[in-house]
Image (spheres, rainbow, N blue to C red):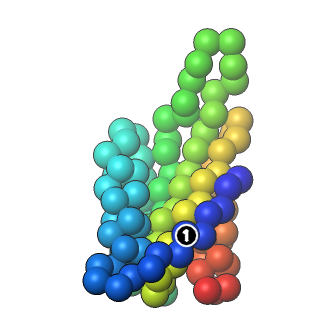
Amino acid sequence: MEIRLVQFRQEELLGAADYSDNNQHWADEEAATDSWDLPGTGDGMVYVHRKPETEPGYLPVHTAEAHAWRGDVTVEIWVSGTKAIPKNKIMDLARRQMEQL
């Protein structure tokens, strides 16, 4: 699991919003991905990738991610493992992290 909080110096542009939107765009582009709104964030999203990443000689890696922002801070969460990542796991992590902001 990896959680990143990125703070932007927003003088002329809403850097946090743009950064989060860009991450959401690329997550949406990935095939075999389910997505849900992250409640309480306005435009935060949670993604579960149904197709694991595979590489010869290694176990398949399942992934999920979440992207949201509040004020000048973005939240990026990535979870990976050898078993499918349930929606409730990534959703709960994202909700708890947003509560801390």
Is 70 positioned to the left or the right of 25 in the image?
right
Q: Is residue 28 above or below residue 8?
A: above
List x then y, in percent, for residue 85: 63, 49
Residue at point 33% right, 79% down?
A: 14
Along the viewing direction, whichever of 23 and 82 lies nearer the viewer: 23
Classify mark 1: helix, strand or loop. strand
Residue at point 69% right, 24% down?
A: 59
Is 22 positioned to the left or the right of 61 in the image?
left
List x then y, in percent, for residue 90: 61, 62
Amino acid on which disc 1 is placed: Val
Is 41 positioned to the left or the right of 18 in the image?
right
Image quarter where the C terminus lies is bottom right
Examine the image and state in which quarter residue 3 appears: bottom right
Residue labelled with disc 1: 6
Residue at point 35% right, 85% down?
A: 11
Q: Is residue 39 above or below residue 24?
A: below
List x then y, in percent, for residue 19: 38, 65
Along the viewing direction, whichever of 38 and 101 lies nearer the viewer: 101
Disc 1 residue crowd, few under 14, some 14–19, many 20+, Cα 10 Å: some
Residue at point 29% right, 79% down?
A: 13
